[in-house]
Image (cartoon, rainbow, N blue to C red):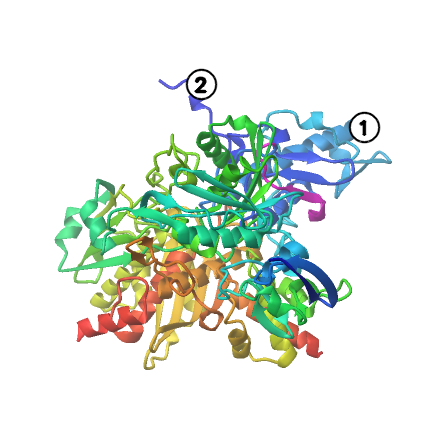
């Protein structure tokens, strides 16, 4: 049965009506129109649908709506502030760190969580932080470089 | 006897099929130029490279170019975006078209200003002469380009290039990195319904029963479409479509087909249907010098596309017209097969390309288009979006074919190869739409009046398919290469990045190292002794130099190896050096690749493709294998089909040869074979034991070690 839910996404409160078991992914994409979070596997194994829930990267494809209500949710659209891209996004552009770009949103989310808790990670720490995200095109090296670049730009 | 028409030289690139200038570009009064290409963006950055070519020949800023997404209603038919041919097909055509367009615009400007064209000064489309000025934009007139392409227009010399040859940021990446809607999966048309398909297991022979009584009253369900064994769900909400799909799967009972081969490689060797000798060289003197013979067999398993975003399509029927949005590689071929499958006229169907997740060959994109069209027939004019689930994609997207290979060679006392034999066994490597009397679209084989499933075929040499790169680039006095084509397919196979080249180069390069070792000669020296092609030698030498090959310091469990090929024997040259560490698993620490693509239109784009190809090939080579079970494909998720992770991905260095004077060739498929050869050779170097069956997993290595002791 459909119920009303209140979600706080990218600092904005919204209301929507859906079944409590609806994966958060579809509420974000189809009810709120935030298409940057993407379906990949439906079982939390690829990272394409990651968002930050209370600051932690989490798969939205197997997070039911009822468990997300009342939490602070940040999607890839929420990484930019006041029309300015996040330093990570600028670094990804500078490094041309993508091929198809489908996994990119989830990787930016994991990287943002990493930099929030560890502003100067080593390359190894970056790789470990991104290990829950899959990339099929083979852009790994560029993305790792981009995260390190963003870290050093934030620091200066 | 040849007629005049038959002896006319073919027009270059895609101009042969699309000879009108107006098919390729349109100049607008607002200072923009629309470029029409039939090639599509599949994550490789092609539209950026084509925009560079157009801007270069028109002599205008890159920002003025608008690349129009391919659409059967407006775009030239350039076949399929595949085979690393987009630069050769579309780039060559656009270069000619834009050169002629510039000449016509200058002529028109000259007439306006009453000044000879040669006295005009032109900067970014602004034209001055005789003290007055005009512009390409003032001269824009569709009638001007309503003519056949004339190939005599002067082309800019590569020495004068200002846009082509410069690293250029991809045009599509700002949206993709900002997370803006860009993919077909992100499209939301007014009134759109969501569809899912209830697919059978891969190895099935029919639908026995389907009890839909439990889901029928589900709120938000808009319909269940059933046509033979094709079952689709339509819903107002995507999550409802998925949950009904899940329930119906549990409720469906499928008749299973006969058992699949237990050992697919043995099965291929036994089932060989058509044998073809594709290369033969004989030199009796050289053969008489043979003193030592070696032979070895290699295998490659079925490999999955495994794109991160499953296939998707949108379809809408409005009156008698069907519009389909698809991330297909070949929108015209898809339209043809949709017409066959739906019993419609082609001119009642429009296929529009929309970008999808990474495409590495013939995946489920075309199939999803027919799925969406079949559901749209029940949607009363509303658009329907279908996205496959992860297990649909693994179970039903065609696999890259399994292959078995046997190589034999003989050495003389100097350590030179005097005889070489290469045999391969494989299903066909292409079952793409648009080529057969029956539609090559999945749902067409499951509906109540099913079409025959076409067998995968092989395209002819020199590009080849299963036999792509089976003929070695090395110079051997005696040589025999045989392709055993197996028509019957245990599972659906089709084109996957580099086709047979991946396995053929893996086998050739592995065997070259086995021979080098037998001859007691360094692998680089050994290759150079057998290779005359100067560009091939140059990339091998460049990779060896960059890797500091000669100064390798041996240590326990570490090894390095080389691999080389020229893609299709007529495209990009690539040599790879791999440095590995073998513990419980193989870890590739570093890959060094040297590449020659002739003129690199967008050098950073080429490097990105080579890096990506090398890392994807590392994943194939170390980890990937589609598992088969009683119900067909048993690898249905990432847990059954692991791919390379960030912590496992090697550092990659790419060195690009600079040859602006040579024709540009594609880069997307050059690295796969050489990388596999390099890794296999590095593993053998590290262990002193050769693993000949892909992937090079812990189990395979342990088995090879136990056999050798």
At mark 2, the secondary structure is helix
Q: Residue at x 53, y 71 (%)?
A: A130
Q: Residues within 10 Å of mark 1 (few under 14, many from 20)?
A: some
Q: Are marks 2 and 1 in contact (CB under 8 Å)?
A: no
Left/right placement of residue B1 relative to residue A57 reads left
Q: Residues within 10 Å of mark 2 (few under 14, many from 20)?
A: few
Image quarter (top left, top right, bottom left or bottom right) of the C terminus of chain B: bottom left
Q: How many marks?
A: 2
Q: Residue furthest right?
A: B131
At mark 1, the secondary structure is helix
| Residue that numbered label 1 is attached to | B112
| Residue that numbered label 2 is attached to | B4
Quarter occupied by residue B408: bottom left
Q: Is residue B355 visible to us here?
A: yes
Look at the picture and state if A54 lies above or below A138: below
- Residue A57 highlighted magenta (yes or no): no
| Range covered by the magenta-colored residues | B60-73
């Amino acid at each position: 049965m459909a119920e009303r839910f209140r979600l706080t996404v990218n600092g904005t409160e919204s209301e929507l009506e859906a079944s409590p078991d609806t994966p958060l992914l579809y509420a974000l994409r189809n009810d709120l129109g935030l298409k940057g979070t993407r379906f990949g596997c439906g079982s939390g194994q690829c990272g394409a649908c990651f968002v930050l829930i209370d600051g932690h990267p989490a798969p939205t494809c197997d997070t039911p709506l009822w468990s997300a209500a009342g939490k602070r949710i940040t999607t890839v659209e929420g990484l930019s502030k006041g029309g300015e891209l996040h330093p990570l996004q600028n670094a990804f552009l500078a490094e041309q760190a993508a091929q198809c770009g489908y996994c990119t949103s989830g990787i930016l989310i994991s990287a943002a969580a990493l930099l929030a808790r560890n502003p100067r990670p080593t390359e190894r720490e970056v790789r470990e932080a991104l290990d829950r995200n899959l990339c099929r095109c083979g852009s790994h090296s560029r993305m790792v470089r981009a995260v390190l670049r963003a870290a050093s730009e934030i620091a200066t | 006897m040849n007629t005049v028409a038959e002896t006319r030289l073919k027009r270059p690139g895609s101009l042969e099929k699309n000879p009108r200038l107006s098919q390729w570009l349109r100049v607008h009064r607002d200072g923009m130029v629309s470029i029409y290409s039939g090639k599509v963006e599949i994550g490789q950055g092609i539209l950026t490279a084509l925009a560079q070519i157009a801007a270069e020949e028109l002599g205008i800023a890159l920002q003025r170019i608008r690349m129009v997404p391919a659409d059967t209603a407006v775009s030239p038919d350039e076949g399929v975006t595949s085979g690393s041919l987009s630069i050769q097909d579309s780039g060559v055509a656009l270069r000619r078209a834009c050169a002629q367009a510039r000449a016509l615009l200058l002529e028109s400007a000259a007439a306006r200003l009453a000044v000879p064209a040669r006295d005009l000064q032109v900067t970014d489309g602004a034209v001055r002469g005789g003290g007055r000025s005009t512009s390409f934009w003032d001269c824009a007139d569709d009638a001007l380009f309503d003519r056949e392409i004339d190939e005599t227009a002067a082309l800019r010399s590569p020495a004068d290039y200002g846009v082509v040859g410069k690293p250029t940021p991809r045009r599509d990446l700002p949206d993709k990195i900002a997370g803006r809607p860009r993919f077909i999966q992100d499209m939301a048309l007014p009134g759109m319904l969501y569809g899912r398909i209830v697919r059978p297991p891969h190895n099935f022979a029919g639908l026995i029963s389907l009890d839909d009584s439990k889901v029928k009253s589900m709120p938000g369900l808009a319909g269940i479409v059933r046509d033979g064994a094709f079952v689709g769900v339509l819903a107002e909400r995507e999550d409802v479509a998925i949950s009904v799909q899940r329930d119906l799967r549990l409720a469906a009972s499928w008749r299973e087909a006969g058992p699949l081969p237990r050992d697919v490689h043995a099965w291929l060797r036994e089932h060989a249907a058509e044998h073809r000798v594709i290369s033969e060289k004989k030199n009796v003197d050289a053969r008489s010098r043979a003193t030592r013979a070696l032979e070895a067999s290699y295998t490659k398993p079925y490999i999955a596309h495994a794109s991160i975003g499953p296939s998707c399509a949108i379809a809408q029927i409005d009156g008698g017209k069907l519009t389909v949005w698809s991330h297909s590689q070949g929108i015209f071929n898809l339209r043809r097969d949709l017409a066959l499958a739906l019993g419609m006229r082609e001119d009642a169907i429009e296929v529009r390309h929309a970008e999808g997740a990474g495409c590495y060959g013939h995946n489920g994109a075309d199939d999803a288009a027919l799925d969406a069209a079949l559901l749209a027939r029940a949607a009363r004019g509303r658009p329907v979006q279908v996205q496959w689930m992860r297990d649909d994609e693994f179970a039903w997207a065609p696999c890259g074919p399994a292959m078995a290979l046997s190589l034999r060679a003989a050495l003389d006392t100097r350590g030179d190869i005097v005889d070489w034999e290469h045999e391969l066994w494989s299903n066909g490597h292409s079952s793409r739409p648009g080529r057969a009397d029956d539609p090559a679209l999945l749902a067409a084989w499951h509906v109540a009046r099913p079409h025959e499933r076409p067998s995968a075929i092989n395209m002819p040499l020199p590009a080849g398919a299963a036999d792509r790169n089976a003929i070695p680039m090395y110079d051997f006095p005696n040589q025999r290469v045989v392709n055993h084509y197996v028509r019957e397919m245990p599972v659906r196979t089709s084109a996957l990045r580099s086709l047979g080249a991946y396995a053929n180069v893996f086998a050739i390069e592995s065997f070259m190292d086995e021979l080098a070792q037998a001859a007691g000669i360094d692998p680089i020296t050994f290759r150079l002794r057998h290779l005359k092609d100067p560009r091939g030698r140059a990339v091998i030498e460049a990779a060896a130099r960059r890797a500091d090959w000669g100064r390798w310091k041996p240590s326990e469990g570490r090894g390095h190896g080389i691999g080389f090929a020229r893609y299709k024997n007529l495209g990009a040259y690539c040599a790879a050096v791999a440095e590995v560490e073998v513990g419980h698993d193989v870890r590739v620490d570093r890959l060094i690749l040297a590449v020659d693509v002739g003129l690199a239109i967008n050098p950073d784009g080429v490097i990105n493709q080579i890096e990506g190809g090398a890392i994807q090939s590392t994943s194939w080579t170390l980890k990937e294998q589609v598992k088969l079970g009683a119900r067909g494909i048993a690898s249905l998720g990432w847990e059954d089909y692991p791919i390379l992770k960030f912590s496992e991905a090697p550092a990659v260095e790419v060195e690009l040869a600079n040859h602006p004077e040579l024709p540009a060739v594609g880069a997307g498929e050059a690295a796969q074979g050489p990388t596999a050869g390099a890794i296999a050779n590095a593993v053998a170097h590290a262990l002193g034991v050769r693993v000949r069956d892909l992937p090079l997993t812990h189990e395979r290595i342990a088995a090879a070690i136990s056999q050798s002791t």
